[in-house]
Image (cartoon, rainbow, N blue to C red):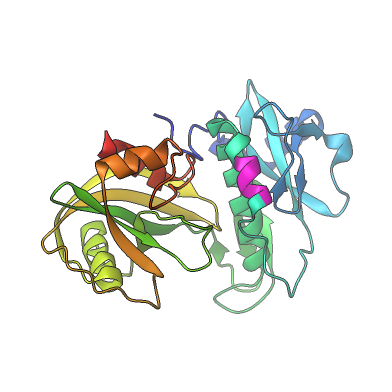
Amino acid sequence: MILGFTGNPLDRADRLRHDPDALAALLPEARLLRLDALMPRTDGAGGLAWTGMADFPAEAQPILLGLIDGRAHVAALPTAPATGTAPAMRSPELMALLAALRPGEAAIYAAARSLIDWHARHRFCANCGTPTDPFRAGWGRQCSACGADHFPRVDPVVIMLAEHDGRALLGRGRNWPAGRYSALAGFVEPAESIEEAVAREVLEETGVPVAEVRYVASQPWPFPSQLMIACTATALDPALSIDRAELEDAIWVTREEVRAALAGEPGRFVAPPPYAIAHTLLARWAG
């Protein structure tokens, strides 16, 4: 099974990130990813929309997304990103576009989106505060004052199903779409293992102690740039004590309920979308 935002068909061509001259020789024939700010344009057939370098914005720099058959594929990085406004996050329009993209196409978009957003939020050196400049074909920023190099960060997030007596534990966040429930999730903290993060997050959010944490799969999540680490765990006590600051609600669901939700049938909850790894977790558990 190919998870959402995985299966990128591009050769990331790390060698070109270190060779500006070789990259420059490829740019005239490169394909340019068409974006409206951070929104993807699509071709209507499950693919991203591309154009040529004749349409490359004057006030932008190229980010090398990778190669296909030796041809460079790039995104445009604005030289002076807008300030004072938060980057566009998930919206019903974006979710509909992502649902229509093939997994590999969504993976290309995820890389472009995460990089452009990271550049917009990291324009100053964290070491000395001096404005930084992109380098390594858009895969880093460099400070001319203190010489520090900065690279795109990926934040690890655990996402998990706790199981007990043939039921799985789901949670609902505030302001989610009506009826939506999903696997619990939370950021891994410094000096914490994946297993420890799973146990802590489930206990903090629902009061349920767990053990026997098992890794299932991982998925990029470009909002803005996380790595979702999917796990299952065994609940030691099913009693709920919900942290209402974190969750609006939490429920135990049966396999029959999960199968019905994944099939789009009416019931107690609406399943997460297919491109989310929570959907994969639920399908795996229900099956």
Q: Is residue 283 left or right of residue 18?
A: left
- Residue 80 x/y as whole percent: 79, 64
Q: Where does the magenta region start and end?
A: 93-98
Q: Which residue occupies the foreground of this view, 265 or 284?
A: 265
Q: Is residue 194 left or right of residue 3?
A: left
Residue appearing at x 36%, y 61% in the figure: 171
Vertical order, 79 against 139 (above or below): below
- Is-magenta flag for residue 217? no
Q: Is residue 156 left or right of residue 91?
A: left
Residue appearing at x 57%, y 34% in the figure: 13
- Is-magenta flag for residue 96? yes
- Residue 92 x/y as whole percent: 64, 52
Q: Is residue 79 left or right of residue 127?
A: right
- Residue 124 x/y as whole percent: 65, 72
The single residue placed furthest to the left in the displayed view is: 236
Q: Is residue 179 visible?
A: yes
Residue appearing at x 75%, y 32% in the figure: 31
- Which quarter of the figure is the N terminus placed in? top left
Q: Is residue 18 visible?
A: no
